[in-house]
Amino acid sequence: MIRLESDRVDLRADYDDLLPGFEHVRLRGSYTDYAHDEVDGTLLFSRFTNEVWDGRVEMTHKPILGFTGTAGVQYTDGTFSGINVNNLHVPFGDGGYGLDGSPDYRSENVGIFLTERRSFGAFDLEAAVRQDWRRIDVGVPPWRETLGTELADLFVEWYGSDWRTILEAEDVAAFRQRYPTVRHDPFSASIGGTWNAGRGYSIGLSYGHTERAPGVRELYARGNNLATNSYELGLVAEVDGLENRGVSAEDILETTDAINLTLRKTEGALGFEVGLFYQDVGDYVFARLIETENETGVPHNFLVYTAADARFAGIDGQVSYQITPASRVALFGDYVDAKLKSENDNLPRIPPGRLGARYEHRAGPLSGDLEYAHTFRQTNVASYETPTSGYDLLNATLSYRIDLEPAKSVEFYVRGTNLLNELAFVHTSFVKDQSPLRGRNVVIGMRHAF
């Protein structure tokens, strides 16, 4: 069972002509306090918390040499806890000593960015850059001892009267070695152009260089993860015989060079959008399966976060036709191929191809849609994976909207998913065989926009 509580506060402000040379200034701030407990019966196994402060300032400048753009700065301060600890129901035993509790992982990130755009007749040019500075510190849990008088006297004989200080210092030093502070300075830049050929046709081409710093779990995982039914080790942990182990986590920065080609048609009854992409990724971080144990009858995986060079290529698109002003039909699909470059193997948990159709109809306040999608069998699997069978999903939605006043409305809806009641296994899941998709399901709800 999950007990969850989340509170969020948002602050938004917009100003026109606040500063010389800038036509618009936008301020955004938020505070999020999230916590959830994972409980089995009356026993508390895990508690995850995440407290995040985020602030962002965007300033849109007046045209310069025909360019319009936005410069900004963003600051994020977050404290996360909960990974590697899933025995909170077990009390700190008598006759012991050591660090007690779940450590806090504090992430502090400062980013600056700039986006620019200019039109040259039928050609639109866009460019963007962003620089971030991120630091993650791991807080040391409190140290405690429950040795009792007799054992404490022995420790006095062995270590002297300052035995508590000595043992705590040793434990803290070992903790800091296992959970070091990690700093990254990722940089990203992109440039792209769109040629508007007329009659709603356009073609776009873009190139992007993106750097991504590993996340908290990718860095510091060192324990059981109940969600994936696995034991995980992060990048800072040393594992003999594995590539990139023992390398400083600060030297691992996921770097992507990507090319995207997009074809669009937006006017007339027939419309489409088709995208092709190719990505070359250095130090791609993923969870590599080392082995699986089945002693309990339930597979338990040993996963190690690993960085390796990879490449991705794929296509996605949609073709639609407006049958009448109130009804439309669309075909959609996507496919991605991913491989490790440094070894003759596929990447794990890559989604298979998908192809589907959707019908939409609106009659005044009443609207509905019917969608059918086929997910293909995934056979391009990593050497330690098993293929996943394909499946068909039929979903439908019926809704009724009441407009109260401008920008305010109430919508009542009924949505059914997996109406064919298919047994569907998701290849991207760590526990695909133990946790298939939900069967036939109907949801009745209400949405209020204000």
Image (tube, rainbow, N blue to C red):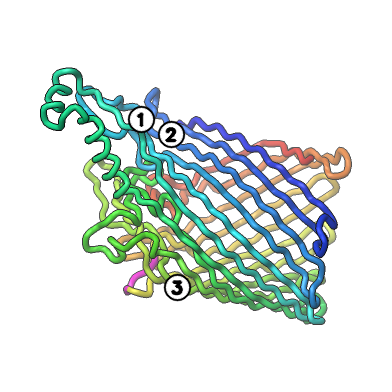
Identity of the residue drawn at 84% across and 44% down: 407
Identity of the residue furthest to the front in this view: 161
Residue 51 placed where, x, y %? 54, 39
Most foreground residue, 384 or 8:
8
Give the mark nearest the N terminus, 2 or 3: 2
Answer whether labels 2 and 3 touch (C-beta < 8 Å): no
Quadrant where the image shows the N terminus: top left
Answer whether labels 2 and 1 touch (C-beta < 8 Å): yes
Q: Which residue is mark 1?
A: 88
Identity of the residue drawn at 53% across and 68% down: 210
Residue 409 placed where, x, y %? 81, 40
Residue 69 placed where, x, y %? 74, 67
Give the mark nearest the N terminus, 2 or 1: 2
Residue 116 sits above or below residue 449 on the image: below
**Picture quadrant of residue 428:** bottom left
Give the mark nearest the N terminus, 3 or 1: 1
Q: CA distance from mark 3 to mark 1?
A: 41 Å
Most foreground residue, 171 or 249:
171
Residue kind at label 2, given as amino acid type: Arg
Residue 357 seen by the camera: yes
Residue kind at label 1, given as amino acid type: Leu
Q: Which residue is mark 2?
A: 47
Image: magenta residue range: 343-347
